[in-house]
Amino acid sequence: MNSKLRPFIDLLVGDPKADRAVPPSGFTANLTIFVSAAMAFLAVFALALSLATGRLADKWAAELAQSSTLRISAPADQVDAQVRAALNVLQTTPGVAEARRLSDEEQRALLEPWFGPDLPIETLPIPQLIEIIEDPDGYDETGLRVRLQAEVPGAVLDNHSRWREPLVAAASRLRFLGWTVMVLIGTATAAMITLAAQSALSANTQVIRVMRLVGAQDSYIARAFVRRFTIRAMLGAVIGIILAIVALLLMPRSDVAGGFLTGVGFEGAGWLLPLIIPPMAGVVAFWATRAAALRTLRERS
């Protein structure tokens, strides 16, 4: 049998005699399960939060990418004439699917988050806004600016690039941050399991000494610790992801609350992503415990 596969075969099959070297319960068992559950819980939330905020940034960027705003600043007696001229220019511009003047109510709704619901927009010198919806191919921005400058001197075109670019950058950074947090959680889990394994080895010094006297090799003894701690870590991770999924399902959905960072969770096949966490926890526990056990046994030989 391939020696590289031997540790994994032993992990699945186990050895009742060697398993007796590791206490089935107690401080180290509870610590391993608790740490794995807590880290899995945090990992699910970190993954869900990064995906949710990434989706939100992508949604905002996509909406802004297909729309522009034309702002008309002119004396009150010239606003209507310039609006008509601007709409005429836009309606004859290739790539513009729709152009419409925003009503006072719509402009008031846009300003409400900053100035409150009772803003007297009719009495304030607020520029008139025109919403532009683009075709999938878009329009010639440079050509449109030239036409507007010639025919509508009070018009300023905003293609939302200064809003869209930071959102696109934020989406990629949030996804990267989510995976970075996963790596940090895995590292912290490995450190805690290593400490728990070393504590278990110290607590079973007499048992290990007797096993050595009857001819047990350090690799044989270490396998018992590896198997027990790997199973504990996977069990704790399963508990953690179950609690995290329940917590995510209890959070307000975006279509109900409509606020920022509501609807934190997964969508569609994304709900399968937490299932990778228990195997990852098992792999981390396997190598962390194996390294800690072999190192500690060598030091005490």
Image: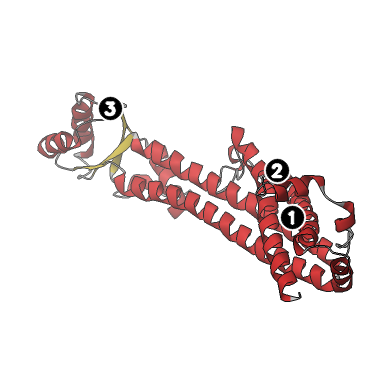
Pointer 3: residues within 10 angstroms few (<14), some, or many (20+)? few
Rendered-image quadrant of the C terminus: bottom right
SS for callout 3: loop
Query: From mark 2 to mark 1, how far is it between C-alphas?
Result: 35 Å
Which residue is denoted by mark 2 in the rendering? 1
Residue 278, percent across and down?
70, 47
SS for callout 2: loop
Amino acid marked by disc 2: Met
Which residue is denoted by mark 3 in the rendering? 137
Q: Is residue 298 at all visible to an observer of this figure?
A: yes
Tag 3 near tag 2, CB within 8 Å:
no
Amino acid marked by disc 1: Ala
**Label whose residue precedes the other's in the sequence (2 or 1):** 2
Closest to the camera, between mark 2 and mark 1, is 2
Residue 135, percent across and down?
30, 26
SS for callout 1: helix
Query: From mark 3 to mark 2, how far is it between C-alphas?
Result: 61 Å
Q: Tell me: 194 left or right of 168.
A: right
Residue 70 sits above or below residue 4 on the image: above
What residue is rendered at 49% in x and 43% in y?
A: 56
Residue 172, percent across and down?
43, 48
What residue is rendered at 76% in x and 66% in y?
A: 197
Which residue is denoted by mark 1 in the rendering? 37
